Image (tube, rainbow, N blue to C red):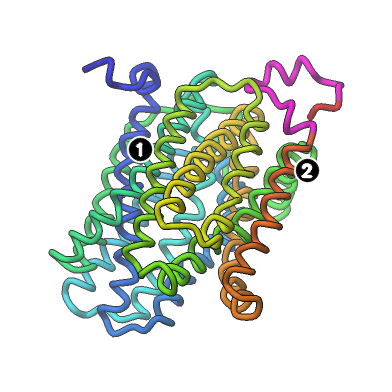
Amino acid sequence: MKSLIPGVLRDESQFALLFVGQSLSVLGDRVALVAVPFAVLSVGGSASDVGLVAAAALLPMLLFTLVGGVWADRLRRHCIMLVSDLVRFATQGTTAALLLTGVAEVPHIALLMVVFGTADAFFMPASMGLMPQVVSPERLREANALRGFVQSCALVLGPALAGGVVALSGPGGALALDAVTFAVSAAFLVRLRPRETASGTAQAPTGGAFLMELRAGWVQVRTRTWVWSGMAAIGVYHVVVLPSVFVLGPVLAEQEWGGAASWSVVVTAFGIGSVIGDVCAYRIRIARPMAVAAAALAVASCQALIIGAGNSLALIAVLEAITGVAVSLFFVLWETALQAHIPEGTLSRVSSYDYLLSAGLMPLGLALAGPVSDSLGMHSTLYAMTLVAVPAALALLCVPAVRRLPAHPAATAAAAGTGMS
């Protein structure tokens, strides 16, 4: 039985605590993604209200992610995550109670999602910055791959679990389950004893100090070519490629493939590919992680072409599974590179810029995808997306600092002064 447990979980006890709690929380998040729209509809909300509630959760993330990054570099990161979990436990539990007692209204849900999104904005940078404090440097890739594995499995299992829970107890029951997962995560975070860094013990900065520390985080991004070029490529992926999956793909499936059942085949295939990609990232040692990541991003950026090329459903599913492998490889290697090469004292600030570019810019692409496809046509828009996204990923691969970045910072120090940073 011991041999079935990944080595990083056996050897890194603090990471094991974090991993177990976060795994349950991720599954709860996937359940909530399905439950919240049905919760809005169950209280008489319209499709516009569903969009309003989604925006209510997203807007605080745009406003507070950078704040969360600064705070996470100054305060104890696991304490910030603990407070965030407790707030999200309270918001999801309150929403569930309002739904189960039949008194919930759309404004109630929207307001609670504002609070939820604010807590999320502080959690994500703290979580990214915490990893090097609970995992030894040589095990970071394995740890990130395991986290990605759980997220990929949740993509497949979460909607099915949500459907069953909603059918049995309604959206309120599903959100109650999500609240319980936050409580479990908080219980594990209470037991966590991460290694302290030079930061993480001071007071949260205010006023001019806050702006100075935010600027210091940006300097870490601006002075590393591989970081800012990687963030630019990620921004293109989120603005250009993901709308083909979240907006145009389901519409095309309804129009040409036979509806939601066909689209679920494609989504499931992508999820299976993601699981395989995480397993590969866990097992394979890569000397030049960002070079492989950039190549994987180029493959992942082909999703719009795959969806719009008019192939058979079986071929689309197989190709989407391949892009799922590529997406998992990219994000595991990207996160590991940041954690390995960015100073721990500024890692959360750098990751907050990363989250802002991805989560912050994606709504722009989601909003534009429909009108552009109405103007150019569905298939033409999907082809155009590919013509923008794939060259952007290949441009990242052409950056010398990206191709040459080693897996470990010691190699970077040895190459100092060669223009490779």
Q: Nearer the viewer, mark 2 or mark 1?
A: 2
Residue 312 falls left or right of residue 129:
left
Residue type at the position of mark 2: Arg
Is the N terminus in the top left, top right, bottom left or bottom right quadrant?
Answer: top left
Q: Nearer the viewer, residue 38 or 293?
A: 293
Residue 100, percent from left and from top: 17, 71
Q: x, y percentage for residue 27? A: 31, 48
C-beta proximity under 8 Å, tags 2 and 1: no
Query: Considering the numbered disc 1 on the image, is that residue within a helix, a strand or a loop?
Result: helix
**Residue indicated by mark 2:** 222
Disc 1 crowd, CA 10 A, few/some/many (<14, 14-19, 20+): many
**Residue at image coords 51%, 55%:** 121
Q: Quadrant of the C terminus?
A: top right
- The span shown in magenta is 400-418
Name the residue tied to disc 1: 189
Q: Where residue 60 sits in the image (x, y, percent)?
A: 52, 64
- Residue at (31%, 43%) from the top-left corner? 185
